[in-house]
Amino acid sequence: MSMKDKNDDGFFTRVYELTRKIPQGRVTSYVAIARFLGSAGSARMVGWALHHSENSGFYIPAHRVVNRSGILSGKHHFPGQNMMKELLESEGLVIEDDQILNFEDHFWDPNKELI
DNA sequence: TTGCTGACCGACG
DNA sequence: CCGTCGGCCAGCA
């Protein structure tokens, strides 16, 4: 085939499907998702995919994906000023200065917990 | 086709 | 701890 094999069902879709598996009250990181998809260096693509997740037609809990330090680096892409923070707090997480407290205790690593 | 941009990360000084 | 830089790669002008 020439261009790309049809498109769709590619990286974006796989990011969405995995993100939907993040349990409520847990969080993961862009690089953890990228690693799970076999493209460790594509953490930026994960963020980009989540940016377009509204067009997927499905509910994608994009607020459960933060950067490797547990900082809400994507908060500016949600409606309002504190939407991402409020969503996470409603699931029981505590956030201070855009930083999830006890990040490691709530971290969900698909590479370890998903078989 | 080239060049630039990103919800990032790891290495380096 | 902080700032900077290169790598990453899909989409768009």
Image: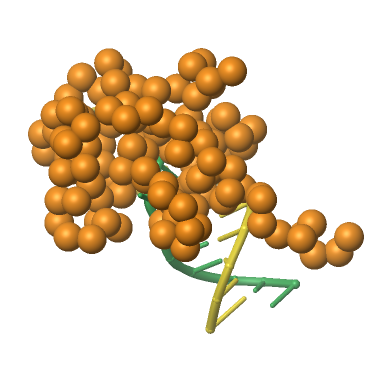
Chain colours: A orange, B green, C yellow
| Depth check, front residue: B11 or A14 | A14
**Residue located 57% across and 29% down the image:** A36
Q: Looking at the image, can residue A48 be seen? A: no
In percent of width and height, residue A92 lies at 17, 28
Q: Looking at the image, can residue A97 be seen? A: yes
Residue A10 vs residue A74: left or right? right
In percent of width and height, residue A54 lies at 41, 59
| Quadrant location of the N terminus of chain A in the rendered image | bottom right
**Residue located 39% across and 23% down the image:** A108
Q: Residue furthest front?
A: A58
In percent of width and height, residue A53 lies at 45, 55
**In the figure, C4 relative to A110: above or below?**
below
Residue A100 vs residue C6: left or right? left
**Residue located 11% across and 38% down the image:** A97
| Quadrant location of the C terminus of chain A in the rendered image | top right
Residue A47 vs residue A38: left or right? left
Q: Which quadrant holds residue A64?
A: top left
